[in-house]
Amino acid sequence: KQFVMIANWLNLNRCGFRLVENLISRMQYIKDRVNQGYVAEVFQDSNFNVYFSTTCCTSKPVINKRLVRSNNQSFKVLLCYTMLEVISNNSLNFIRIINRIVKRRFAMSPADLGNKQHMLETIYKNVWETDPELFKLMKKEKRRQESGLEMIASENFTSLSVLQCLGSCLHNKYSEGLPGQRYYGGNEYIDEIELLAQKRALEAFDLNSEEWGCNVQPYSGSPANFAVYTGLIEPHGRIMGLDLPDGGHLTHGFFTATKKVSATSIFFESMPYKVDLDTGLIDYDKLAEEASVSCYSRCLDYKRFRQIADENNAYLFSDMAHVSGLVAAKLIPSPFEYSDVVSTTTHKTLRGPRAGVIFFRKGVRKIGKDSKKIMYDIEDKINQAVFPGLQGGPHNHAIAGIATAMKQVKSLEFLQYQKQIVANAKRLCSKLQEHGYKISTDGTDVHMLLIDLRNKGITGAKAEKILESISIACNKNTVPGDKSALNCSGIRLGTPALTTRGLVEKDIDKVVDFIHRGLLLGKEVSNISGPKLVDYKRILSIDANIKAKVTALREEVETFSRQFSIPGFEEY
């Protein structure tokens, strides 16, 4: 009863509540000291990573003010635990003082604030106190993620340690420039963090620092790619990337007959290459004649790309954003053996923060006709394209997240995780094929697959909408032969997020059943609504029979999904 009262008093969250329950079993630790007439301990526990210091006897106890002001759940857990210790020994004086602290809600007192109270009255409070409207939306999103199945191939659930980096004091610091060459003072520890991130990024892919360097400052994958183009070629220089409808990405130079869609196609001359319409595979012979992927589910022939690049005196730039985790785990061929530059995001299969990394070659590029060594000169070009060319101060909290994510890459757990991603993707593919779905390239080697729905009587946009209605998140996607990215014939599915939550092959079988039933329901809606998406959405929202079927299936999906936890903070 005392524990529940104090937990409510302190607004402990569910995670904190459970931690205190575990700590109660260690009551004797303090009791011995209380029986001696005082408590003088510094509690340090790796679960909380916070220090709590107090003295308890007949005189007034001393509470560490900095921790009282911190108002974090870890401190509250320790405080609640200590209060229970003291209650068990009837130290009422201590409880009275704690009572006064709690009534202040762990904020600084008016005396502490002085004439600055109006400036500081919100910054020591939690978001649920200062902005309940926003916090309510955050909790809704958390419930959506817990209750639904995230199958967007570019999404994942990052680790608690990465989230802690993203919410740390590193957010506060400006650090324009590179380590040792900053435009601001006070960056000695920021330098160490960035150098650690660079070192671990190279180690994650077993790269020799004499042959490779990296820049960990890009805000995400698209800025990283644009920095490479900016650094290595002049305006209107020529690039080639896989065409968007064939599985490429916007940043690889996508344009239409009437519009240059991405900045890459605006500032550079883009010549996209395509896949074979019958097989869905890259036509390397056609690519060689004409001399980056986002939704290509097969391993790439980097050696062939290298040969084509050399024949045209071109740089080979590999964007491995989707598959970098699989590359690090050595489950698919690595682009590093043949590429001059490699970029990646860090939040997809790497399961890190939302950020980007550029790897670039150093040392000898090739031997000239006169046997002289021709050296790479791209390091400074790329670094200067990132800053000051395209960005200002780097996001140090994200760079710290990269550092800890790259450390996780070298663990056995990460290797097992990557293997399970591929196993789940292959199971997803085979089970969908059993239901008669056409898979682009007739299979997958990686974490994702592309379903061609043209033989199922439903468009990609309608499929995305009906699956979203039953709490399965995916994205509509062009398939080979599509003319417009706005009128897609397929959907893309990925397994990284589901695998992070602990799903294995037998669970994927259930997921396929949900998808199949959802798409059948989607076709039923389409038969009623006709071809227009707006009418399709209207029927979903007003037809009582359809709504009942959607609700029933969604409840099945959500009941299944809630069996699997997601990492992160307890409530948001």
Image (tube, rainbow, N blue to C red):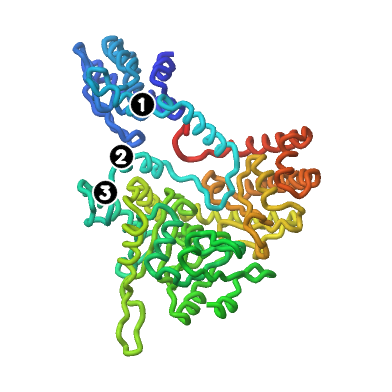
Q: Which residue is mark 3?
A: 190
Check residue 169 in the rendering and tell me which mark sits there, or answer none.
2
Dot 3 amino acid type: Ile
The outermost residue toward the bottom is 370
Mark 2 is surrounded, within 10 Å at the Cα level, by few (under 14), some (14 to 19) or many (20 or more) other residues, namely few
The Cα–Cα distance between marks 3 and 1, rounded to whole angstroms, is: 27 Å
- Relative to the observer, which residue lies in front, 194 or 542? 542
Cα distance in 3D space between marks 2 and 3: 11 Å
Amino acid type, mark 2: Cys
- Residue under circle 1? 125
Q: Is residue 155 left or right of residue 513?
A: left
Q: Which residue is at a point 49% across and 63% down the rendered structure image?
A: 266
Q: Earlier in the sequence, mark 1 or mark 2?
A: 1
Q: Residues within 10 Å of mark 1 (few under 14, many from 20)?
A: some
Q: Please state the horizontal and vertical placement of residue 200, each as a whole percent of the image.
A: 34, 56
Q: Return the residue nearer the eye: 433 or 311.
A: 311
Report the Cα–Cα distance between label 1 and label 2.
Answer: 16 Å
Residue 51 lies, with reference to residue 371, above or below; the image says above
Which quadrant would the N terminus be assigned to in this image?
top left
x, y percent for residue 100: 30, 13
